[in-house]
Image (tube, rainbow, N blue to C red):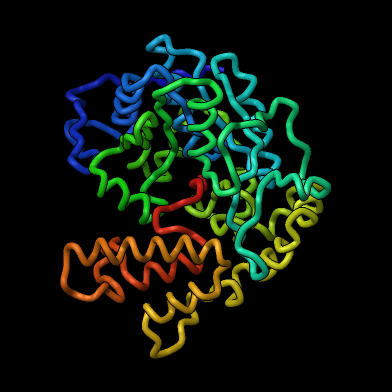
Amino acid sequence: MDTQIATPEKETKTPWISATGYVFQQGKVNVLEATLERIRHLFTLADTYVVSFSGGKDSTCVLMLSLQVARELGRLPLEVCYIDEEVIDPDTLEYIAQVREWPEVALRWFCVPIRHTLRAKGRSHWLTWDEREKAVWAREMPAWAITGVEGLDESSSYRDVIKSYYFNTRKISPIVCVTGIRIEEAINRKRGIIQAGTYVHHEGRYIYGKPLFDWKTRDVWKAILEFNWSHSRYYDRMWLKQQGLLQQRVAPWGNVANNRHLPFYAEFYPDFWEKAIRRLPELRAVARYGQSPLYREILSKPLGMSWQAYAIQILNRLELADRQVWIHEIQRYLNRWARRSTSPFPEELEGGDPGPCWKRIAMIMAKNDRIKGGNRDAT
């Protein structure tokens, strides 16, 4: 498979990147050329360059562009990490297994317990590959899976898995880890780029890169189709079901990012659906009622109640572990606000301001999310 990219001849196409990382037009510069330059820069920051891969459309673009630059620089095979979330659609799993066979890729496939969101009434989280639930796992672990990673516990994040594997197990540092995060998909992502002022974040020995941040969904699909890149056929199924491009997301079943797709899964993957609802019985109710008012509590804020009071009401309904996390988050934002303003913490902000306020806190808590976008991006 030829994954090289042939770009048109350049005519004064020098990218100019602002303080916030946004690419502005200068000559005929485009996001593809700017991203290739960012990836080249990221390769210079450490000897080990890792692609955090989910099988989704965004991480597919990061993977393919990183492969091109790795060829240019003689940095093959390319390190790729996949965190297997157990209840994932079979098409995406098949695509990732194909990528694992590419000779230019060294893919590390992790099957470790990760606490994951579950948008359901009975519970808000579940643990992937939980040994206590082995009898009802949605599928068997692949024979090549990496299961023993030092220093992890049930509160570990995807980033913790990658850090622990390279720093503790393989004794490699520093590393650059890149993801397909795009600011179009979430206000938290946009705010993170604006606050940091760059697409590169340094966390000690861990360097986190977001080279694709300013791409639009149409840019992603233009690249995939124009360069004939392999991709998960799950997207093709969604397209045939007339799901809009912005609604086509790869994420674990039950995650808020793909609840609208659950009604299709029994049709697409009947055998796997039976195993999935045995593993997560809540999926049956979410598939039936996920788009109904039963799962849209945020729309039912009592008339006359303030957003602060509503946020506290939601907070008191959370499980103890989630409540403690959110108490810490809210206190952090209140303290930060108090250092820069004598006004009360705002109820809501006008004009699309992405800053913190009680309304935003309530909305994110209602979706089992985190202000900082704590869970892996769905792509």
Q: Residue drawn at (24%, 21%), measured in percent from left and top?
A: 10
Say if 269 sits above or below 346 in the image. Answer: above
Residue nearer the viewer, 204 or 137: 204
Q: Position of residue 143 (x, y in %)?
A: 75, 27
Query: In the image as oriented, which residue stretches furthest toward the bottom?
Result: 304
Q: Residue drawn at (42%, 32%), measured in percent from left and top?
A: 178
Residue nearer the viewer, 155 or 30: 155
Q: Is residue 5 left or right of residue 129?
A: left
Residue nearer the viewer, 160 or 192: 160
Q: Residue drawn at (24%, 38%), measured in percent from left and top?
A: 23
Q: Position of residue 168 (x, y in %)?
A: 52, 27
Residue nearer the viewer, 328 or 81: 328
Q: Is residue 20 left or right of residue 230?
A: left
Q: Residue drawn at (32%, 37%), measured in percent from left and top?
A: 201
Say if 307 sits above or below 38 in the image. Answer: below
Quadrant in which the N terminus is drawn: top right
